């Protein structure tokens, strides 16, 4: 299984943070910046696709041990002791304080958040002091740069050769709806010429079933395994799809791509084919409304005289760019001018901080979808349910009926599992009447 070197995204504040404040926007900066964080990055030299971001810098300068204090005090005259004692108490306090300040930054991921953090209360969990190292891994499972489609939208694929490529980044994760979601999405993407599909699976290992599935569509693709670091798994809210998108950004960087257009397209959204025509000509950053977002069932730019002047979104939370991940596209040539491009593990703020990291200015935004009057992408959500275990004896899951192959396939897709002993008994019926399994299967 081939794997890729995975260098961490740079730990630096975005250029955008230096921009003038937008009119009417309140931002509170603190004197903290990344240079003060002293974050160490340790790309693993050996097996190479692992990156460890170690935030444990403070281990060496811990509080002096209590055991030393009495010895010190014995050898020092009592007048000096009276100021040494407060200092001894103060030093550990300062160290602990400093440690907490350092850890409160999203570990090792750079972008200065202080100017957007005022309303950050609901998400503090993820930034709380955490001594575990952050491990990010990226495996390239399989890829194809060949377009296996002879025809796209009634024209030979070759007719589109001059078009810029759209790099469509899809974070996905194993659950019973995964294969259906990807199948549906693939059937939309099949109609889109000059598209490279980056499917980044939030999973430790490469999923061979997914390789087969992606190969079958004929869409040029890269399948990678890019699991969410362990420390975020139980966070509420968790940074959903962030490790995956970061891995895709890493892949783009490693391939030095400076032509084409980047778009983040979740596996459960609904895409109008006109979206792709609209985003393909993105010069810097294009934006457009996304339907079914939050309280207003829409999120997107406000446009006057062909220019983006503000944003409509029910959750502002001091975000300079209160847009959905599916509501913008970025030109790769433009993005390459910003080597510190970043998407931090900061639920709710991923879009904002990503767009800050590429120095975006409101005047530069290209409104799409007929000046943002049309919805070309919908934030549809599929109901997630646990994969069921069904009681169906193994002895009947052989070649005598279809059920053996069917349940093997459902198991591989993570949809449903058969068991001899667990789960509700599978009902097999004829003429409206359930019968024992042996009746049909033995
Ligand atoms: N996702 C992921 N790992 C997770 C949860 C979600 O990779 O643990 C992916 C998911 O497949 C989707 C994107 O991240 O493409 C956003 O997740 P979801 O659609 O669940 O979030 P929403 O924005 O709809 O609330
Ligand atoms: Mn979704």
Image: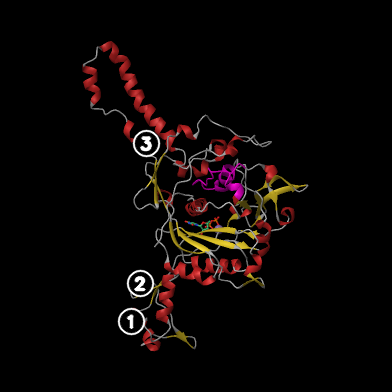
Disc 2 packing (10 Å; few <14; some 14–19; many ≥20): some
User: In front: 43, or 240?
Assistant: 43
What whole-number distance in Å separates the C-alpha atoms at marks 2 and 1?
15 Å
Which segment did they paint magenta?
Answer: 333-359
Residue ID for mark 3: 57
Q: Quadrant location of residue 370?
A: bottom right
- Element carrying mark 3: helix
Q: Which mark is residue 422?
A: 2
Q: Which mark is residue 60?
A: none
What whole-number distance in Å separates the C-alpha atoms at marks 3 and 2?
48 Å
Q: Quadrant of the N terminus?
A: bottom left
Q: Are marks 1 and 3 in contact (CB under 8 Å)?
A: no
**Image quarter where ligand 2 lies:** bottom right
Q: Which mark is residue 395?
A: 1
- Does residue 346 appear to the left or right of 281 in the view shown? left
Q: In the rendered view, how is the structure colored?
A: secondary structure
Q: Is residue 366 visible?
A: yes
């Amino acid at each position: 299984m081939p794997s890729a070197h995975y260098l961490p995204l740079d730990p630096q504040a975005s250029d955008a943070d230096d921009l003038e404040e937008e009119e009417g926007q309140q931002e509170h900066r603190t004197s903290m910046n990344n240079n003060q964080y002293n974050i160490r990055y340790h790309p693993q030299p050996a097996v190479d696709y692992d990156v460890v971001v170690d935030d444990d810098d403070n281990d060496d300068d811990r509080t002096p041990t209590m055991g030393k204090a009495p010895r010190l005090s014995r050898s020092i005259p009592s007048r000096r002791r009276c100021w040494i004692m407060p200092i001894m108490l103060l030093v550990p306090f300062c160290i602990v304080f400093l440690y907490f300040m350092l850890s409160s930054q999203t570990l090792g991921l750079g972008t200065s958040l202080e100017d957007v953090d005022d309303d950050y209360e609901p998400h503090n969990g993820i930034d709380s002091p955490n001594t575990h190292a952050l491990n990010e891994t990226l495996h390239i499972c399989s890829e194809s740069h060949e377009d296996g489609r002879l025809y796209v939208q009634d024209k030979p694929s070759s007719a589109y050769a001059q078009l810029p490529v759209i790099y469509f980044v899809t974070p996905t994760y194993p659950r019973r709806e995964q294969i259906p979601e990807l199948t549906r999405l693939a059937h939309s993407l099949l109609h889109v010429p000059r598209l490279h599909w980056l499917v980044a699976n939030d999973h430790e290992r490469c999923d061979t079933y997914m390789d087969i599935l992606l190969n079958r569509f004929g869409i040029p693709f890269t399948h990678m395994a890019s699991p969410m670091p362990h420390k975020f798994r139980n966070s509420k809210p968790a940074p959903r799809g962030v490790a995956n998108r970061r891995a895709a950004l890493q892949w783009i960087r490693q391939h030095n791509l400076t032509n084409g257009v980047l778009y983040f397209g979740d596996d459960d959204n609904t895409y109008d084919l006109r979206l792709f025509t609209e985003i393909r000509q993105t010069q810097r950053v294009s934006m457009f409304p996304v339907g079914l977002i939050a309280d207003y069932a829409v999120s997107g730019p406000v446009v006057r005289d062909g220019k983006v002047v503000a944003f409509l979104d029910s959750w502002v939370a001091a975000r300079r760019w209160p847009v959905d991940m599916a509501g913008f596209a970025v030109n790769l040539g433009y993005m390459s001018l910003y080597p510190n491009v970043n998407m931090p593990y900061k639920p709710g703020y991923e879009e904002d901080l990503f767009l800050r990291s590429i120095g975006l200015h409101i005047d530069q935004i290209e409104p799409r979808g007929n000046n943002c009057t049309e919805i070309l992408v919908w934030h549809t959500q599929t109901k997630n349910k646990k994969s069921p275990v069904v009681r169906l004896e193994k002895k009947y899951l052989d070649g005598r009926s279809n059920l053996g192959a069917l349940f093997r396939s459902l198991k591989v897709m993570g949809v449903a599992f058969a068991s001899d002993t667990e789960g509700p008994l599978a009902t097999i019926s004829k003429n409206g009447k359930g019968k024992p399994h042996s009746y049909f299967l033995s």
